[in-house]
Amino acid sequence: MIPTPYPLRVNPLNVRIVTIANVPDDLAQAWLQHLRDFDVAHPGCHFEVMADAPEMSVADMLRAVQVTPGLTFQQIIERDR
């Protein structure tokens, strides 16, 4: 079990699943679209996504996370390369 600062069961009827996906840059958008498609198909689900690619510019990262329907961003942090 991966330790997490968040409770695994926010709602007793839901299960929190933590996934870390390491995918090539050119597959990042496809992976996020897959996740978004699942989210849309199952309205009871809620996803929080973090993407980290220090070699990418903020503009490139924003292009990589463009999916339909669009994601709601809460925070974008640029860090040193």
Image (cartoon, rainbow, N blue to C red):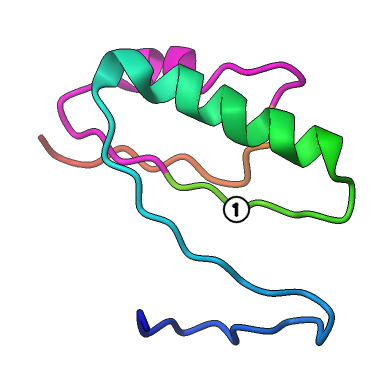
Which residue ends up furthest to the left in the rendered image?
81
Q: Is residue 6 above or below residue 45?
A: below
Residue nearest the observer in this picture, 77 or 38? 38
Q: Where is residue 63 in the image (x, y as percent from the top left)?
A: 46, 12
Q: In this view, does 6 lie above or below 51?
A: below
| Residue 33 within the magenta-colored segment of the rendering | no
Q: Which region of the structure is painted magenta?
A: 51-70
Residue 38 on image: x %, y %:
71, 37
Quadrant in which the C terminus is drawn: top left
- Of the 4 image quadrants, the one containing the N terminus is bottom left
Q: Can you name the residue that lies furthest to the right here? A: 43
29 and 38: which is toward the camera: 38
In the rendered view, tell whether residue 20 sits above or below residue 5: above
The structure residue drawn at horizontal position 39% and vertical position 40%, both measured from the top left corner, is 51
**Residue 37 position in % (x across, y down):** 71, 28
Q: Is the magenta stretch mostly helix, strand or loop?
A: loop
Above or below for 72 versus 55 = below
Q: Residue at x 53, y 29 (%)?
A: 32
Q: Mark 1 points at which residue?
A: 48
Please tell me how crowded label 1 is: few (under 14), some (14-19), or many (20+) other residues with Cα within 10 Å. Answer: few
Q: Which residue is drawn at 89% across and 46% down?
A: 43
| Quarter of image, res 52 | top left
- Residue type pointed to by label 1: Glu
Q: In this view, does 30 lie to the left or right of 3?
A: right
Tell whether 56 sits left or right of 37. Answer: left
What residue is rendered at 43% in x and 57% in y? Answer: 19
Quadrant of res 4: bottom left
Q: Is mark 1 on a helix, strand or loop?
A: loop
